[in-house]
Image: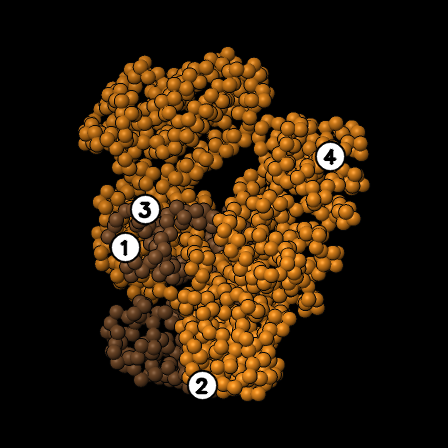
Chain colours: A brown, B orange
Amino acid sequence: MTETDKPVLITKKEWEKKMQESEISTLDMNKLIMEYLVIEGYKEAAENFSSETGLAPCVDLETIQERMLIRNSIQNGNIQAATELVNELNCELLETEPELFFKLKQQQLIELIREGKIEEALEFAQEELAVKGEEFPELLPELEKTMALFAVDLNSCSNSSPKLSHLDSAIAHNPDIPEDIEQLLGYKQRQKLASKLNSALLAAQNQPSESRLPSLLYLLVWSQKLLQSDANFPKIVNFFTGDFEYPSEPSSKKPS
Amino acid sequence: MEQENTENQDSIQNTQLLSENIDAQTLAFNPENTESILPQSSHDNLESLDLTADESNIDPELSSNLQQFSSNSYLSNWAPLSEQSENSLRFVERSRGTTRSSLIPSVSYIARLSNNSQIRRTPLRLIRPSGSNTSSFVAGFELQESDGHVLAYQHNLEDEYEDSDQDQEDSERDQEDSDQENEWQIADSSFSQAYGSLDSEAENNEIEKHLSQVYTDADADDASINLFSKLIFPTYLNNSHFGLLKKSQQEYIKAFLKLDPIHFSDSDYNWIDSIFLDSSSVSTDSNIDIVNPSIPQNYTVSKKTFKKLLEKNSVLRKSLEFPTHWNKSDINKNLKILNDMLQADYIGSGRDDEDSGMLRTNWPMPSTCGVFYYETTIINKGRNGYIGIGFCSSKVSLSRLPGWDPDSWGYHGDDGNSFKSNGHGTSYGPKFTTGDVIGCGMNFITHEAFFVKNGVFLGVAFKDLNPSFPLYPSVGMRTPGEKIKANFGQNPFVFDIESYIISQKNLLWDNIMDTSIKQMLESSTIKCLQTSTNPTDISCCLPITDVKFSKNEMDDTISNSLVQPTSENNLVKISLQDFNENKISPKNSLLFSLMNLSNNNSSLHNEYLPSEKDTINELILSYLIHHGHNNTADIFAKNVIGINTEAAKKTINSSKVFQINQLLDYKKRQVARRKEICNLVEQGKILDAIKILKDNYPSIFKNNPNLIFSLRCQYFVQLAEIANSGLSSFRNMISLSLENTTPLVKSNDFCDESNVLNYYERFGFNKLDSDKDKSNNSVEYPSRSNDLNDIEMNSGSDYQKDPRYDADTLQHDVNKNAEVDSVMEIDDFFPSTAISEASEMQLENTARTLNFQKLYFSDTFPDFSREYCNVSSQQDASKAMMCYGQKLNSYYSTFNDSNMDLHLSKLFLIFAFSDPLNNLHTKNLFNKSNLYEISKQTNSEILVAEGNLTCTPLETIYKQTEFCLSSLTEKFFHGSTSVISLAQKFKTQHR
């Protein structure tokens, strides 16, 4: 995009004025942070933050611990343990959320396959998953996808044992395996489930199930991108420092 | 006149206390007396000022000290009040949008001002007229106390009657910001922003355009319009920027209409009330789309009144630029609009397509409403039911149906086809006929249009609608007997438009959350790494990332990237160096990024990008530290690391924790030091504060000489206070400002090095370091001090290039005695600079990398001369004051700064009076709140000097996002951004 495509220049001065007008109170920001700490499970930090700011945590901090245990179990691949913990914390949750229950079972199956316990996995799939699939037809496509894992030669996936592919795009993508099936084996799959479960648990406690702070990052990138096609303006170019890149003002000639 | 009186009666009950500092001594307000003291002025006589000082009805004991003011006149006429008494009271009132025309509504105020000198803050009482729950005026007071200090009060009457969100926000702000004056400014700035003036010609054109929508030129001033159609507020708009804008004006219109007693009777008021109250109350009930339908729909207002209303402000006009009815001057001759401006009948011959007729609305659909929606009822399908519903530009010929021509789009009843700018329809939906209600929606978020039949969504009809011209809702008919009636929100919609908008909003959010921030993360990381490639600066590193692998992989990754042997030695070196150079700040050192990656960073970021959560963690940590939440920061850092690494690598853990602790310690000391300085200032220990400032933040002396100047003036004032006050208070002062201070400021302790070092240790300076630095530099001292006077005149950059200050030449080993001697020697020539210079020496070495030389060499003010440091009696104090005053004068006169000169001459007025503490002219110099002000300034200056942004990256990101969104909406009229409200999402609200 060249300079001529951006007819409007928002000068630094204009921008500074706007920035000064914009304001978020410390209280609001603290609340956002508290929400993040609670939802992400930083229990001690939340406790301290509460005492340092006088802001009451929006939730019983004890429940954070339990949620975190569940999250960690899933992230470590210990689905059985996670399921038990969920039932301990909220025995009705999995009954009222059949999709979540299915996802847990699905993950458990994936872990079995990963560990190479193919026979055990087959048995598990027939006994646990298929039933769910019959009961809730909308889950069938997902079930099919999972079953496709049996058809995949996992050893070709990576050296010997199927590892978690943790990166957004697996470095060495195996062309023989459909991408969406390969994704099932990824670490992201565990993470997704963990987040989903976390949200469900929070929702069951009548808590906001997602912290709002991360969306700010997306909103920033999105809105800067959108504004970019209309105007030249000072942009944040560094998340960590909040550093800006200023557009060249008309007087100064600068190659773009 | 009758009405006036009832207003007064009511207002008594609505008495409201403005000041939070109501003193018990103040009289209770006696409602029975009010009538007599309230002005009887009429609206015709706005120029007059009504000031009634009625003392007869008031407690006789206090009546002499009490004056009551009331006024319902112009602000400009309130000013003379200030000359009425010694406790002058100045009113400043603004009503939204009316300042320019300087029309002040009939709001009455009664203020009580006690002359009792004990009551410093005089409570004010604000009384509103009856029905004041409709008022939208910002009332403000500036209370000028006898000492000249001005306290500003403002109160937004709207507060209690706005919707709950607003209420919440306001009260929040009140809580946060107890500083009244500050608040006043806030009110002020938003005021001018919202109601910025237009040049008058453009303004007139705008008004004419509005008027022409309703009146013809021939209409007399008292020709009426139906105000109802103007004021409709479909609640689906609540989700958008346009809706918020419109909403903000409703109160205003309501208030305005109340103020026009010529045209409105009592019943009118009630009606207007109901229209507004309804519009806000329905917002909570998503099923009702319009204002209470029971209100009369034939309510009219004269052209004159309407014009008056429009003249008020441009925001109001903008908020009215919304399709509310058909435009009777934008219609084909084959059609006829009925009186309600909503129904249109076909009156042509209907022989062929040439006899088609179309009509458009009064205004185009505003894109900032996000989604625009209207419904059309087919009253009669006529002969053939050739009815087209849609929208088009203002240029499209009116003898066509919508959709046939370029720049027009429509859905036709006879075949159910959609027409997109040409005569050939595309199969789209069902046919429609008599009795059907057809909805037409324009989605500015997705740039799509859709239709609805009898409440059933028919799907997207047109895509990629992003024309540069405005679009008007339009309907066309072709055969005799056809009749339609439009509904732009006057009546409830058949379709649940609100749910539709909410689902669109959610989709938009999904979209936003799908935005790839990877690139940004990458570039941010690279930027951080780039900083660290500078060999002199090794404190910058990659943020550690959320570790999200199994243990096996952890090992891999860690050995690859994370724990490249960060030797402990290296680490200590970094930290000490950084600490001493004030170098660690959120700007150049990431908190979770303590891993030193300078060796193999090139390969790193490819494989190892921070995640969104790492970023948030980073931002939160810098926020916590910035705001001094040290414990939380500490634990948060450990929590994040602990959770992520589990028990995987104890070693990394410990080294990371160690580093974070180091950083936190440093930060803590920094915060503690900042707080200490500010406390010192607040307590009046100015010299101590200057001392620490000089030692730790020399850049302030260069960058903000005004702050230092203020501090020094303050010290002068204090000396004056001591000199002019009794001994008891003097003792007090001394103990406050001098005795308890560090040994440094005591005379004769200058050269006692242990004291100096103790001092440094107290403020977090490493003894070893200062020792070393001192010995490194002090030999240069005499010559440099001499140079100083010359150099001061030169610009700092020249100075920097001076080879004598090259690092190498300074690295001489010198023994300490020589240093001390030199200090003593110089003491004779520069009696005052000795100790301060000596301490500056210590900083010199460390500061060199930051180019600080030029910064603190420019300040040679003798702060610590024993002539005025060593004050032990009142006489001493006067002497010291004289001496210090002279120094101030001679030093700062070289700055050639008119403000400084002005302040100095004010300051030296103290010499002129025998009792400056109580003299009217000098009294306010001794006001203790000055200290608080200076302390606040100092705080922010230190933050700047520490390299901290005045707000944290997290807050910067918030502000920038808000900037982008509001620019997109207000400047470029994006539909998508106009349905996103940052405040709604991130600020406190009921969840």
Q: Mark 4 points at which residue?
A: B52
Q: What element carries label 4?
A: loop
Question: Subunit of mark 3?
Answer: B
Mark 1, other Cα within 10 Å: few <14 / some 14–19 / many ≥20? many
**Residue B377 numbered tag:** none
Q: Which of marks 4 and 1 is nearer the N terminus?
A: 4
Residue at x-position 36% and y-position 55% = A8
Task: Residue type at mark 2: give it.
Answer: Ser
Residue at x-position 59% and y-position 75% = B336
Foreground residue among B37 and B382: B382
Task: Residue type at mark 3: give it.
Answer: Asn
Q: Is residue B602 above or below residue B871?
A: below
**Residue B588 numbered tag:** 3
Task: Residue type at mark 1: give it.
Answer: Ile
Of circles 3 and 4, which is in front? 4
Residue at x-position 45% and y-position 70% = B395
Q: Distance between the residues labelled 2 and 3?
A: 61 Å
Foreground residue among A129 and A193: A193
Q: Is residue B445 above or below residue A44?
A: below
Instruction: Indicate left or right for B216 with A163 as reference.
Output: right
**Residue B427 numbered tag:** 2
Q: What element carries label 3?
A: loop
